[in-house]
Amino acid sequence: MPRDDRFINGKTYSVLLDRTLLGLSAVTTAILFAWLLYYSSYGFLLGTEGFYLNSIANPFAYAINSPPSLFGFVYYWPYQWTGGDITVLRIANVTLTVVLGWILSLLVIRRLWPVGWPHAAVLSAGIASLALVNFNTTWSRTPNYNTLTFQSLLVVMIGLLLADRPGRIRQVSGWILVGVGGWSSFMGKPTTAAAIALLVMLYFVFLRRKSLLPMLGSALVALALLIVTAYLIDGGITGLVSRMVNSADFEILLGARHDVSFMFRIDWLETSRAQLAITVLMVIALLLGILMASTHKLLLSLALAAVLIVTIAIALLGTDPISITLSTLFLVPAFTCLGAMFYHEGLVLRTQAPTSVTLALTFLVLPHLFALGSNVNYWWGGSKAALFWMLAVVAFLSPLGQQGRSIATLLPLTVLAQLLTASVINTAILKPWDQVKDLRAYSAVTPMPGGGKLVLPQPLHDYLATARAQAHAAGLEVGTPMVDLSGRSPGLLFVLETRALGRPWLIGPWDRTVAHFGQTWPLVPDTGSNAAAVKALGLESCADLANAWLLIEPKGPHHLDQASVMASFGARQADYVAAAAFETPINNGDDPDAYGQFLLKPVRPAVLAEQSCREARRQRLDSQKQTPS
């Protein structure tokens, strides 16, 4: 056979293998996405998820926000548009996150790698599957301040990459998106918004942009949106500033470790020898695959196809041979970059362009900026934004694209991202946080507010059904104000369609360490829960408190001090009658035991209850004035 014919046949063979693998990767991405969407109707967390839903359903009812986040106002209108259907909300939340991750990944690849549109679309979609890691806990599928912050960071980075492309329209659109992302990050997590503003300025300086007008334009967009938001929420900037200051003070009183002194800290990346071994093996296999692609094309293709098939098997069958922990999501990108430095005497380092270096560093720090201000381990919190770590690798290895190794480098990275995603999501499904194990085994279809339905474990279904039946039989009406003294059941108040007084979740004392996803991290201590509950209820009208029902859990592990909290609004046990009684559901997480809960209905005339409330507040105010500061 002539030499030219052999070359053409070899090239055709190589292209055919690449197309086959890209097609299988596209199928894998679709399965991972559909997988999470399918389980969007499964599971419900009474605590954290109940807090999110109460915040979204009625954000204007609260004078303070704890934690200091305005995410409820952002998601309020989508909640109304969906009719309060939790499943639809979850699906929309997951879809928006994945689409934004896909757009960002596509822009990064198109900016730094010489790859055509069809290939770039498939590769970026596979890498963007890591955005699904943001939902590594079942409650995080419901819109919340963490998902809003992650989405905001994606929008900011999309804007920066668009602004760096030729064309006036693209540049203007990009800087507008930076402003919109900055505003929405403030609505999600103000600490991250402050950090991302600094990061954008540094990004601007590192790339040596001469004109400050685009960055100032973005700042004006964010400021204009913030002013409009302030007027819609609190009637002006002064009201919004007062809200945020009071919310920050409330967090200090609560003892939730959101104060500035705790914010700037260095947490340890906790891992194990087994995970380190898995990481090293993954990275060695990845680097060998990238470097040997030209000489062992068939072998590499078979290996990648096998990994994709394993990934699909994890999603469809629930069998996970690796069971990685969240620390691996950082270790794999970090070790990959470290190993790539030794390729061809540091070729990757020597040929870096300013843009790729800036993007790699930016993506590297973004997960920690995402976690900034959280009261959990920053590595654990940052791992929810692990997509940025993988994009840092994509940017760092971009010099290989100039050597004609684009597909050979990006395809193994894509396959690895998909495998990591499948393992993390599978763990979340098999061991959902604070719920009965294995979402796949849930079978009880439970009606929820808004006309939607969730598939729940039988104990939780029975608990909600019993509570709802007894409450309605006792005369509880939709919209009735309620004080939750159980310290952990805001989700029940949402299901009963009552209005939680004080704050969306009057959280009880929590102070211990748990293991989750192989990580050990402390739960929110909330040592000032009782004092915080008194302060929050003090912001409610005495008319609402006089007509409020109570939910109590006298022997529960996180209950608030019933006597002192009730006394703060002039109430006693004798002013109520037990209208319903039921037991909390048992699960495999924080609630291994059942505890009795009671709904208390007010029996005292509302006029007398209001007078007693006002008198109790007057006495407390007089006592505070007499107490020396």
Image (cartoon, grey):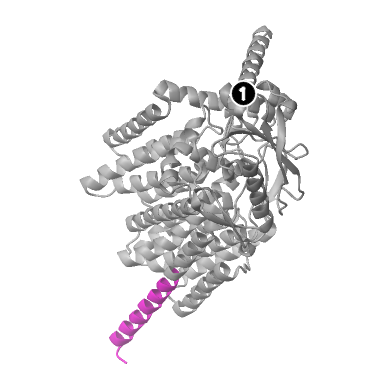
- On screen, residue 522 versus residue 365, left or right, reads right
Tell me what residue is drawn at x 73 percent, y 52 percent: 586
Residue 397: image quadrant is bottom left
Q: Which residues are magenta?
A: 1-25
Between 490 and 196, the one nearer to me in the picture = 490
Q: Is residue 462 magenta?
A: no
Specify the farthest residue to the left. 168
Side of 478 where 206 appears, left or right: left
Q: Is residue 70 above or below residue 451?
A: above
Q: Is residue 386 visible?
A: no
Residue 98 point in image, percent of width and height: 43, 55
Q: Residue at x 45, y 45 (%)?
A: 79
Q: Position of residue 307 (x, y in %)?
A: 53, 71
Residue at the extreme bottom? 1
In the image, 416 versus 374, the foreground residue is 374
Find residue 211 and report its image quarter.
top left
Question: What is the three-letter code of the residue carrying label 1?
Answer: Ala
Give the prevailing secondary structure in the magenta stretch: helix
In the rendered image, residue 191, in percent from the top left (x then y), is placed at 50, 34
Q: Residue at x 34, y 45 (%)?
A: 159
Residue that label 1 marks: 606
Q: Quadrant of the N terminus?
A: bottom left
- Residue 10 included in the magenta stretch of the image: yes
Quadrant of the drawing holding the C terminus: top right
At x 61%, y 30%, the residue is 548
Compared with 300, 453 (above or below) is above
